[in-house]
Amino acid sequence: MQARMKHHQLTDEQICSLLKTEKTGHLATLNPDGSPYVVPVHFVYSDERIYIHGLPKGQKIDNLTQDARVCFCVERMDGILLDERPCDVNTAYQSVVIKGHAKMISDMALKNTVLRHIIEKYTPSLAAAPLPEAAVRGTGVIEITIDEWTGKYFK
């Protein structure tokens, strides 16, 4: 870790806040050849886990089925910190990097709960609408168990 970043660590409470408020994260999985594959995703942070929804098939699903190790990142850019010298311009930000293990969720009750949380986060006006069982069954839900996280900021 860079020496200056040791003084810019987010607390666990600040990390939780960032995970609860930000709308987009980036999920990194490993391709069979060991190369990384990173995709932007919508997510919720609940019960000390990250949940992601989407199609039940595709490259990220294939990858995490073969190797459950993942990395997940969320960031918020608060603005540019201007300086008179171009090389001294900086960014005010907060970020979280999570290392963990992912798996697909098949339990219908858990999938329903997670999808409810996603609806409440992204489309709260639809939170009271019923979820059709076929839609829940046909939606892929990834659960990331967090092994470690780090958060940093600069302002």
Image (cartoon, rainbow, N blue to C red):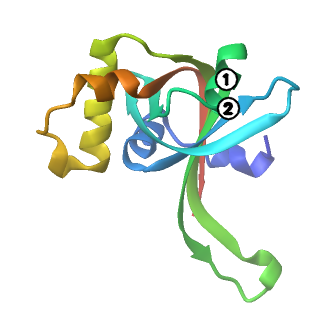
Residue 67 in sight: no
Q: CA distance from mark 2 to mark 1?
A: 5 Å
Q: Secondary structure at mark 1?
A: helix
* Image-quadrant location for residue 148: top right
Residue at 69% across, 41% down:
38
Q: Is residue 134 above or below residue 88?
A: above
Q: Relative to 28, does residue 91 appear above or below in the rendering?
A: below
The numbered dot on residue 59 is 2
Nearest the eye: 124 or 91:
124
Residue lying at the far top in this picture: please name it: 107
Q: Nearer the viewer, residue 69 or 92?
A: 69
The amino acid type found where label 2 is placed reads: Gln
Whether residue 125 appears in this view of the structure is yes
Please give the name of the residue rendered at 49% of the width and 33% of the height, measured from the top-left corner.
Answer: 55
Q: Exactly how many numbered labels are in the figure?
A: 2
Tell me the SS state at disc 2: helix
Q: Is residue 2 left or right of residue 12?
A: right
Residue 47 pos. (x, y %) = 36, 21
Disc 2: CA contacts within 10 A as few (<14), some (14-19) or many (>=20): few
Question: In the rendering, at what x and y percent does residue 125 appear?
Answer: 16, 51
Residue 130 position in % (x across, y down): 14, 33
Q: Is residue 95 above or below residue 108?
A: below
Q: At 44% across and 45% down in the image, what residue appears?
A: 18
- Report the residue marked by disc 1: 62
Residue placed most toward the observer, 120 or 137 = 137
